[in-house]
Image (spheres, rainbow, N blue to C red):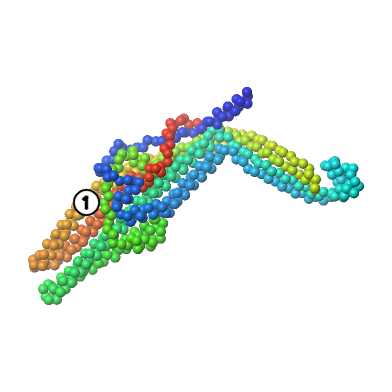
Amino acid sequence: MRRSASIALLLAASACTVGPNYKQPEPPVPAAFAEPQPSDGGIDLAHWWQAYDDPELTHLIEIGLAQAPDLQTAQSRVREARYEVVAARSQGLPSVNGTGNAEYLKFQQIGSKSDINKLIQQINPSQNGSGTGGTTTQQQGSIPRDFHTFSAGFDASWELDLFGGVRRSVEAARAQQEAAQWNARDARVQLAAEIASDYLQMRGYQEQARIAAAEADAQARSLSILRHTAQVGLVPQGNAIRQQTQLAQAQAQIAPLKAQAGVQIHAIGVLIGETPEALIAELNTDTPLPMVPPQVPPGLPVELIRRRPDVRAAERQLAAATAQIGVAVADLYPKISLTAMPQLATAWLGGFFLGKTFQLTAQGQASFPIFDFGGRRAAISEREEQREQAYIQWRQAVLGALRDVEDALVRIDGERNSNTDLRGGVIAAQRSLATVQAQYQVGLQDYTPVLEGQQQLLQARNNLAQSDVRLRTDLASLYKALGGGWSDGDAPPARPVIADAPKKR
């Protein structure tokens, strides 16, 4: 009866888990976003880059997601976190170690043969001289000088998790594993957006280089005409000189733009895990900018918090920090460990078998914290501050996610309006240049307005090309801000929300 009561008391104590239970905090989010939202564009956020309808961009992102060094590092951290869960779980289970021992002792004669023979007869009474004389003489003359012992066994030890310190450690390790998984998804989001941004900027520089080259070709043709007309005295020689200066300025813009495009090609190569020059032949082509994809609506802010991997990772870090408090609190309570050591041993003296023995040792040990100058209490307070820091970081991640979406929405709205105005400006510059050229040809204008018109048209086209790039990169920033780039099927199962319990110390 007393034994049953002791077992029941032990089981009841082992069900106790000290420290605070984790409760998922409510995110500080508004009911809706402040900036204007578009209608549903029907974009799959998991593969948002396909909305640009650019096979090359899709190919590069898929390669990056398969072999980029940043993603390989993130995946390695996930595996590392899984091993940490296994290590934490093993702390609450018994450990068994095999043991083996072999000894050999060689000794010299320290007494007479008769003394040693007496010792042999005591060890083995069957050799008492009752046999034949030859045998006895041979046995008495054979003095053992070697002593062998062999033992084998194992020891098992188990520290009882009476107050849940190990369980809290496992809880923290699992939260860290889930945080690593969300960080890996966030790495996918970051990588896809960075590849897309570099790719769009590269195509933008190439587009501006083509504009500058086309304008230089047009001005070269104008210079050829002016030189011929100046030779026959129809126009002043100064017009040809000024046109030649304008042509040199247009040509001077081409090389820096191509160099900037090359820099972006190098960046993309490194991002996807290739050497910087690996993509030069593939990307240094006459390819226009991708189409403008539709703008996806951001939805509700609370949905964004569930979608953003960085916010989810910060929330899991908060859960791990909360569990670590319980690990520190458990150090305030007694620790009980059980040990058992069974062992089988055999011995030989010379050629005589002395027998074998079985030994079992069992031990129970308990340690009670009495006085440590406040070290354990300080460790608990330290873990509580770490949880407070994790909460602040999670809240900052939430606010940063909201800001990313609001910023992307306002930039897209402003860039769309600017892009429309710039397109109108290009049309106006083309008409203005055509007008002054016609007036110059009939002698109503000198050549200065023509040069100014050419420069204005080139600048208007460059401004429009830069706006086209910004509009596309702003949309990529919106997809990134919404947490696009990972599949819903890869999300870990939701953790149950547990009400906060009073702290036990």
Q: How many labels does the image show?
A: 1
Q: Position of residue 216 (x, y in %)?
A: 22, 66
Q: Which residue is drawn at 22% across and 67% down?
A: 217
Q: Where is residue 178 in the image (x, y as percent from the top left)?
A: 44, 42
- One can see residue 277 in this view: yes
Q: For this view, does 118 lie left or right of residue 261? A: right
Q: Tag 1's secondary structure?
A: helix
Q: Which amino acid does label 1 sit on?
A: Ser
Residue, disc 1: 418
Q: Residue at x 16, y 71 (%)?
A: 225
Q: How crowded is mark 1: few (under 14 residues within 10 Å), some or many (20 or more)?
A: some
Q: Position of residue 84 (x, y in %)?
A: 51, 44
Q: For this view, does 124 lie left or right of residue 290? A: right
Quick one: which residue is furthest to the bottom in this view? 232
Q: For this view, does 424 lie left or right of residue 105? A: left
Q: For this view, does 58 lie left or right of residue 165? A: left
Q: Where is residue 165 in the image (x, y as percent from the top left)?
A: 53, 36
Quarter that holds the N terminus: top right
Q: In which quarter of the image is residue 151?
A: top right
Quick one: which residue is furthest to the right in this view? 133
Q: Residue at x 18, y 70 (%)?
A: 223
Q: In which quarter of the image is residue 252?
A: bottom left
Quick one: which residue is furthest to the front in this view? 132
Foreground of the two, 330 or 45: 45
Q: Quadrant of residue 454?
A: bottom left
- One can see residue 471 in this view: no
